[in-house]
Amino acid sequence: MPKRVGMEVSIAIAEAVKLCDVDVISAYPITPQTHIVEHLSELVANGELDAEFIPVESEHTAMSVAVGASASGARVYTATAAQGLALMHEILFIASSMRLPIVMTVANRALSAPISIWNDHSDIMAERDIAWIQTFAINGQEAYDLTFHAFKVAEDERVQLPVVVNIDGFTLSHVIEPIELTEKELVDKYLPPRKTILTLHPDKPVTMGPVGIPEVYTEARRQLEVALLNSKAVVIEAWKDFAKVFGREYHPIEKYRTEDAEVIFITMGSITETAMQAVDKLRDKGERVGLVYIRLWRPFPHDEFYNAIKQAKAIAVLDRAISYGANAGPVYTEIRSSLYDRRKRPAIYGFVAGLGGRDISAERFFEMFEVIKSGKMPEGPTQYLHLDVKED
């Protein structure tokens, strides 16, 4: 029987990585992901995990080491957050372009300045176009489970792409939650050993990532885009396999009480469970409200999303990041673009809240609902909730 224990989510993720039999962990400490790699270092030091733990001098180096190790055939893991992810930026494109199945946890945190160690989604939204598969966990169990799923998808011979698993910093990373831990036998049943397709080896020299002259560069980039788009089918297939082995089901888009909903909230990450509470309270008042949350962010599941919201009269998209200069949140702009060519689509309202870790309570969702219920479209594409200063 599976063992259910109270455990810090960061520790649970490290335990999942251990069960995946990783070969190399490249690590640099940055709040709030540090507990993950600290625990992995303990597991390696005490002999519970046979892996190379490489403490590096920066996040740029952490991803550089991950690239080299993965190119040589190793199963590789790392984790980061915020400015660390930004420092990796240059190498993130190399990892995906060279089709290296690295798995990374990002404990989402606000970007500076001003300096903030608290949660929002500005770090990962700045990395939307790195050609990595990206998923979001809403709680500790999902963070644990999505780690296994990430290795399964990344290393599939039809994919061969790196994967980011996003968890909200502090809100998840440092919180103790009940986690249903799995047995090693089940993980081995679900996740086979890595089979390399093309590797660096002194006995069989190859060139990886050479110069792409103008005559081939466009084709190479398009090939990467097609690979990322095609990975969606494997992502879904791997979730189906996960349900068969572990008994828990996951989908790219999830619905909550949407069967007759006229207004649907759209969320990503741990704020989703607060949104569920708000939906329940509004339902108790007789309001026809529901929730759709996005688990697969890249590649974006356009059809699944549309099918989940098409019956609604309006949707309220909650962003925890700003797409600067667009006067909108990045998830809002993504969804608006996704629905543009649909003949029948709901009214789309955009909201930004929770920047720099500011609390988002159920009352914020009530505010969003009242804006929509008023029937008045906002003057701009996005409204800021709980803004304590007057705008110029």
Image: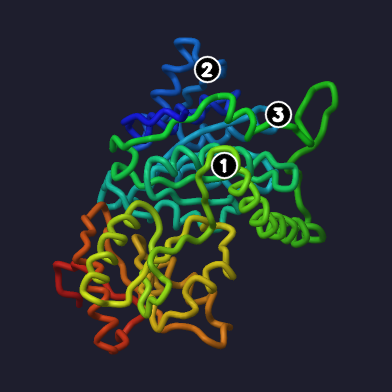
- In front: mark 1 or mark 3? 1
- Residue 212 falls left or right of residue 155: right
Above or below, 283 relative to 371: above
Mark 1 neighbour density, 10 Å: few (under 14) some (14–19) many (20 or more): many
What residue do we see at 63% from left, 29% from top?
Answer: 75
* Residue 164: image location, x then y, percent: 52, 45
Labels 2 and 1: the sequence-earlier one: 2
For the point 28% across and 38% down, which residue is it?
A: 175
Left or right: where does residue 53 sit relative to residue 390? Answer: right
The answer to whether one can see residue 140 in this image is: yes
Name the residue tied to disc 3. 73
- Between 299 and 343, the one lying in front of the other is 343
Q: Name the outermost residue toward the front.
A: 1
Q: Is mark 3 in CB contact (under 8 Å) with mark 2? A: no
Dot 1 or dot 3: first in sequence order is 3
User: Cα distance, mark 3 to mark 2?
Assistant: 18 Å
Quadrant of the rendered image containing residue 387: bottom left
Tag 2 residue? 49
